[in-house]
Image (spheres, coloured by chain):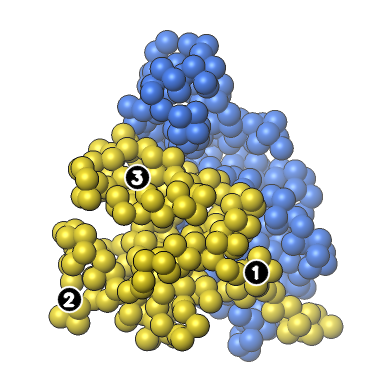
Chain colours: A yellow, B blue
């Protein structure tokens, strides 16, 4: 299932939390060779993890970490504007654009990568639609281009640096209900179930109690 | 809404004092036809204060009793950046429940929504609407207006920062080269398709640069953004 958790809520899912930061170390430090900081426990964190970001985490049916990403608003400090201005040609700032970074897949067979990616991106699409956003801006590596294309939600590329496998790009994704439904199909999640997950995370009104108060 | 948004931004821009801005906030109550509208700065640096339409009795009571210490709406703003309906918050604890009842008595309403605003200097603020209606009506209202509420909250925040002299106007308005190019070409009369072609980017990307520039300039639409950028000497045509 999809979990939507702020950093200060991660302790409610300690196993998922540790697996996410470990899988990030594997993906970004080992596989991609990015200049990231891995701690003594083999977990990768950066300064943006300290800004109480919102994580979207796909949990496999067996309870393990399937993959995840991290969201922050672009109106405050964020990674895209702090570190990739040279690629984007300047800060991208809008209340209607949030950034998505640290898109990460847990260890999985190639054939599963697409389905798990679809699930994580579905989480992103749900966030966008629920909160009235227009776009997500994100940083991604060369390997993801093919995956996004296969999912039918390719970003508009704002710029790239590096070449070949080391190519890093910044892209924009536009939210729509059509995309949400497409991702549901690719992720193998019923649209109603996906809607339920995000409602439970952010705003299934706990009205019974409040209304009881009012009488 | 577009023309209303334009009118709103124009009024915000003409404000020279926080008192005038408060009038504009009060005007939003009629635009949205809700009980109350509040802009609340909750950061500890600088004087915290609110622009609100609440009844004086309730506002005074809230301040005197320091109810922001137990108000779940305010406390949530520190932890989240997504807009939230008040009913999604936790009201189980006794002080919160008592507070809810007092707020009802104070005419706040049984529904509310808040947009937390995280600014570029690590500051927080909160833009909220409250109303009396059913859950269904409120859900509909929220899905219809959410994007506008995000924009209005952020524009108010910028305006307050400028009026309080916490931000130099120029600090907010620094257009990137691509944003400048986009506005300059549109200002020169090119349509989006041609401007995009000229800059060798897609129309979609061009739209994002315009949107970003529009936000930085506090402009309601592209024409307004071009005019403001010109007025501030950021572009020339």
Mark found first going from the N terminus, 2 or 1? 2
- Mark number, residue A39: 2
Image coordinates for residue A125, horizontal then vertical, percent = 55, 57
Residue B204 higher or lower than A29, as above or below: above
The residue at the point 60 percent across, 56 percent down is A182
Looking at the picture, do discs 2 and 1 lie on one chain?
yes
Mark found first going from the N terminus, 3 or 2? 2
Select label 3 or label 2 by which is in front: 3
Farthest residue to the bottom: give it: B94
> Looking at the image, which is closer to me, A58 or B99?
A58
Looking at the picture, do discs 3 and 2 lie on one chain?
yes
> Looking at the image, which is closer to me, A194 or B37?
A194
Crowd around label 3: few <14 · some 14–19 · many ≥20 (10 Å): many
Image coordinates for residue A81, horizontal then vertical, percent = 32, 46
The residue at the point 74 percent across, 62 percent down is B139
Q: Quadrant of the N terminus of chain B?
A: top right
User: Could you tell me if residue B97 is visible in this image?
Assistant: yes
- Mark number, residue A170: 3
Image coordinates for residue A132, horizontal then vertical, percent = 60, 52
Q: Write down the quadrant of residue B90 in the picture.
A: bottom right
Q: Write down the quadrant of residue A161 in the picture.
A: top left
Q: Quadrant of the C terminus of chain B?
A: top left
Q: Write down the quadrant of residue A170 in the picture.
A: top left
Select label 2 or label 1 by which is in front: 1
* Residue designated by label 1: A190
Q: CA distance from mark 3 to mark 2?
A: 27 Å
Q: Secondary structure at mark 1?
A: loop
The residue at the point 52 percent across, 50 percent down is A152
């Amino acid at each position: 299932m999809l979990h939507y958790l702020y950093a200060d809520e991660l302790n409610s899912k300690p196993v998922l939390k540790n697996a996410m930061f470990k899988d990030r170390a594997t993906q970004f430090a080992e596989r991609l060779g990015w200049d990231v900081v891995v701690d003594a426990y083999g977990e990768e964190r950066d300064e943006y993890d300290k800004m109480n970001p919102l994580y979207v985490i796909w949990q496999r049916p067996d309870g393990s970490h399937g993959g995840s990403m991290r969201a922050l608003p672009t109106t405050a400090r964020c990674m895209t504007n702090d570190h990739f201005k040279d690629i984007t040609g300047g800060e991208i700032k809008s209340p209607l654009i949030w950034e998505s970074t640290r898109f990460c897949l847990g260890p999985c067979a190639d054939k599963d990568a697409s389905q798990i990616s679809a699930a994580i991106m579905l989480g992103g699409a749900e966030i966008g639609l629920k909160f009235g956003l227009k776009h997500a801006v994100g940083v991604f590596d060369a390997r993801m281009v093919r995956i996004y294309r296969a999912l039918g939600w390719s970003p508009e590329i704002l710029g790239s640096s590096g070449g070949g496998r080391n190519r890093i790009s910044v892209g924009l994704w536009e939210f729509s209900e059509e995309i949400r439904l497409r991702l549901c199909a690719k992720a193998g999640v019923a649209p109603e179930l996906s809607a339920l997950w995000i409602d439970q995370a952010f705003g299934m009104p706990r009205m019974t109690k409040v209304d009881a108060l009012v009488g | 809404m577009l023309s209303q948004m334009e009118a709103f931004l124009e009024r915000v821009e003409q404000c020279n004092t926080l008192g005038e801005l408060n009038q504009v906030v009060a005007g939003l109550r009629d635009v949205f036809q809700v009980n109350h509208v509040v802009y609340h700065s909750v950061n500890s640096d600088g004087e915290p204060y609110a622009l609100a339409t609440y009844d004086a009795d309730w506002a005074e009571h809230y301040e005197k009793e320091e109810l922001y210490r137990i108000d779940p709406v305010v406390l949530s703003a520190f932890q989240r950046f997504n807009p939230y309906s008040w009913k999604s918050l936790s009201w189980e604890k006794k002080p919160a429940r008592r507070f809810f009842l007092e707020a009802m008595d104070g005419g706040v309403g049984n529904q509310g929504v808040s947009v937390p605003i995280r600014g570029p200097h690590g500051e927080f603020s909160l833009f909220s609407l409250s109303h009396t209606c059913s859950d269904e009506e409120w859900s509909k209202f929220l899905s219809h207006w959410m994007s506008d509420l995000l924009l209005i909250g952020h524009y108010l925040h910028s305006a307050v920062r400028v009026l309080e002299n916490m931000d130099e106007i120029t600090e907010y308005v620094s257009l990137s080269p691509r944003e400048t190019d986009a506005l300059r070409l549109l200002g020169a009369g090119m349509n989006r398709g041609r401007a995009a072609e000229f800059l060798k980017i897609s129309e979609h990307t061009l739209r994002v640069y315009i949107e970003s520039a529009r936000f930085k300039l506090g402009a309601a639409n592209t024409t307004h953004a071009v005019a403001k950028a010109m007025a501030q000497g950021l572009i020339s045509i």
